[in-house]
Image (cartoon, rainbow, N blue to C red):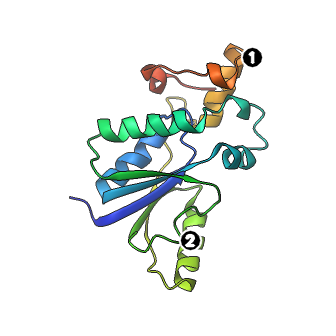
Amino acid sequence: MPWVDEVILGGTFDHLHQGHKALLEAAVSFGHFVRVGITTEGFAKRLRRSDKHVHLMQPFEARKETLREYLILRGCKKFEIIAIDDRYGFALSSPDAEGIIVTEETYPTAVDINKLRTMNKLDQLIILVVPFVYDEKGIIISSRRIRKQLAAVDPSISNEQTVFTENKDEMYWD
């Protein structure tokens, strides 16, 4: 039984992996209505300027569709996926939001969001921190590692050629 009516979360959701799925599972369990912010390509690339394989990031529409399919597969009936182009997305303007799902890495942003929501006369959000997901070697599963592995497998691969099978969750990245 979900704890709140509306829960929000945001991210790039590039090459949807077990870490993303842990966040989404928490969101589906935590809220009746799940609102997901997905970074635009421009914002995602600005965030990852130091990632030399950022060109292997999936296009926005592909990331959005994969996310939509996963939420449907998971049985989530009430959700919305919104493009975000800044650090806070719609979190500062969602009066019905009651909870936010974050990782350990993004927890400070949730704290900032709550401070800004208070200044905007909105209720603070209940923050649910989902731990990182680690591979069998104890390394955090991440999209950055997936892109690095893709580049190692085929350095000539372009963004449009980046396609993954359902089996990508079984892959471990060094």
Q: Is residue 161 above or below residue 37?
A: above
Q: Contact (CB < 8 A) between labels 1 and 2?
A: no
* Element carrying mark 1: loop
* Residue picked out by circle 2: 113
Determine the residue positioned at 51% across, 46% down: 132
User: Going by the image, does 33 lie left or right of 46?
Assistant: left
Q: Residues within 10 Å of mark 1 (few under 14, many from 20)?
A: few
Q: Please provide percent x and percent y for residue 43.
A: 68, 50
Amino acid carrying mark 1 in the image: Pro
* Element carrying mark 2: helix
Q: Please provide percent x and percent y for residue 6.
A: 35, 64
Q: Please provide percent x and percent y for residue 1.
A: 20, 58
Of the 4 image quadrants, the one containing the C terminus is top right
Compare residues 54 and 169 and report the one nearer the observer: 54
Q: Is residue 74 above or below residue 99?
A: above
Q: Is residue 74 above or below residue 53?
A: below
Determine the residue positioned at 69% across, 27% down: 148
* Residue picked out by circle 1: 155
Q: Is residue 63 above or below residue 94?
A: above
Q: Please provide percent x and percent y for residue 155.
A: 75, 16
Q: CA separation, marks 1 and 2?
A: 39 Å
User: Going by the image, does 148 lie left or right of 141?
Assistant: right
Amino acid carrying mark 2 in the image: Ile
Compare residues 137 and 146 and report the one nearer the observer: 146
Q: In the displayed orientation, state which residue is furthest to the left.
A: 1
Q: Residues within 10 Å of mark 2 (few under 14, many from 20)?
A: many
Compare residues 64 and 2 and report the one nearer the observer: 64
The dot on residue 49 is none
Determine the residue positioned at 48% across, 34% down: 17
